Structures are given as C-alpha cells and as structure tokens.
Amino acid sequence: MKIYIIGPSGSGKTTFSKILSKKYNIKAYELDCIVYDDKNNHTKRTDKEIATMFNKIIKKKSWIIEDVGRNKFEKGLECCDKIYYLKISKFIVYKRVIKRWFKQRFGKEKYNYPPTLFQFYDMLRIARLYFKNEKQKLDKIKECKDKVVFLTSKDLKLM
C-alpha cells in the first residue's frame, strides 16, 4: 500500500501518518525531512539530493509520505494507491502552529528544527501560503480523484 497525505503545517499530517503506519505496519516519511537535513542545522538539501532520496522512497513496495503538496513530489501522487487530503480550517491550523511552537519552545514537544522566533514566523508564513495556493493543490489532485479521500479535523478526531 502506498499512501500520500497532503495538508498544511499543523493539520495533523504527522500524527495521522503515525496512526496509519502503526495500523498497516508501513514506514512513514515526513518529506520535510527529505527537503531539510535536520542533523545539519536544518539545512536545505540540493534538488539532486532531494530527488534521489524521494525516488528511493517511492520505489519501495509500500510507504506513507506526508507533505504540504510541493510540486517536486508530484510523482508521489501518480504512484500512490490513496491520497488523504486534510481539509482543515485556517483557524485550527494557525492555532495548532502557535500551540506547537510554544510546546517546542518550552521543551514539551520534540522538534525537527530549533523553535526560534524566526521559525515561528516562518511556520505562520508557510501556513498562509498553503491556503493562498490551496486551489492549485486541489486542481492537481483532481486528476487522481478516484483515490482521494478528504478528511476534516472532525474526521481525524474519530481515528
């Protein structure tokens, strides 16, 4: 089984991917960790490194990948068996991003990159851009409509 989860920062992608990973015994991958090398001060990898790592993942027999729907990972949409699109309201996303930053800042939650003030503003910026460009993401997955499942925050709470 190959599953692609798309949603904005703070939508619950990682939590949902962990649930599915445990349920189906399939390895889950955060594509942010492919784009950024968290062992090297959250440095962005080269496009070649990203493509190499991503292609290794999608060639596997099964996987769960989660991302904000970046163009460079479109091949995952073609290769997957199911796409979960997390349709979460802006209010909930912003609230979760703020809450996450405070938890990480005060050591209550693990983080991939240091929870600096710059990072806080960047996460809010990324969330805003996601919603600004959401129509393009939805247009992309229209081509795969037979394998798309839309989930709201209420749906995720039931899991």
Image (spheres, rainbow, N blue to C red):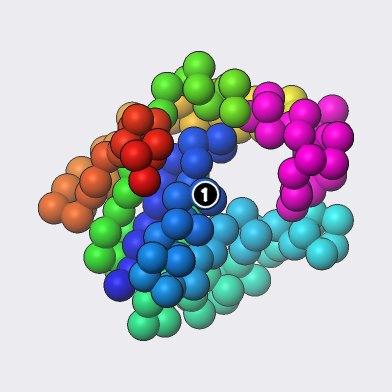
Residue 10 x/y as whole percent: 56, 35
Quarter that holds the N terminus: bottom left
Q: Is residue 129 above or below residue 19?
A: above
Question: Which residue is located at x 23 percent, y 49 percent?
Answer: 148
Q: Which residue is drawn at 50% across and 41% down?
A: 12
Q: Is residue 110 in the magenta section?
A: yes
Q: Give the x, y percent position of residue 16.
A: 45, 50
**Visible in this render: residue 45?**
yes
Magenta span = 97-119
In the image, what residue occupies the spot 86% across and 56% down? Answer: 41
Residue 66, x across and y down, in percent:
48, 54
Outermost left residue? 146
Q: From this view, report whether residue 113 is shown above or below residue 95.
A: below
| Near-viewer residue (70 or 14) | 14
Q: In this view, does 140 lie to the left or right of 153?
A: left
Res 69 visible: no
Please give the residue where the numbered disc 1 appears in the rendered image. 15
Q: Residue furthest top?
A: 91
> Dot 1: few (<14), some (14–19), or many (≥20) neighbours within 10 Å?
few
Up/down of 158 relative to 53, above or below: above
Return the residue found at the far front: 158
Residue type at mark 1? Thr
- Name the quadrant containing residue 50: bottom right
Viewed as shown, does residue 135 lie left or right of 149? Answer: right
Residue 70 located left or right of residue 105 = left
Q: Does the magenta stretch include residue 72?
A: no
Image coords of residue 144 (percent x, y): 20, 53
Q: Say which residue appears at 49% left-offset and 72% top-offset.
A: 27
Q: Is mark 1 on a helix, strand or loop?
A: helix
Q: As drawn, is 125 to the left or to the right of 54?
A: right
How many numbered marks have been drawn onto this rendered protein structure?
A: 1
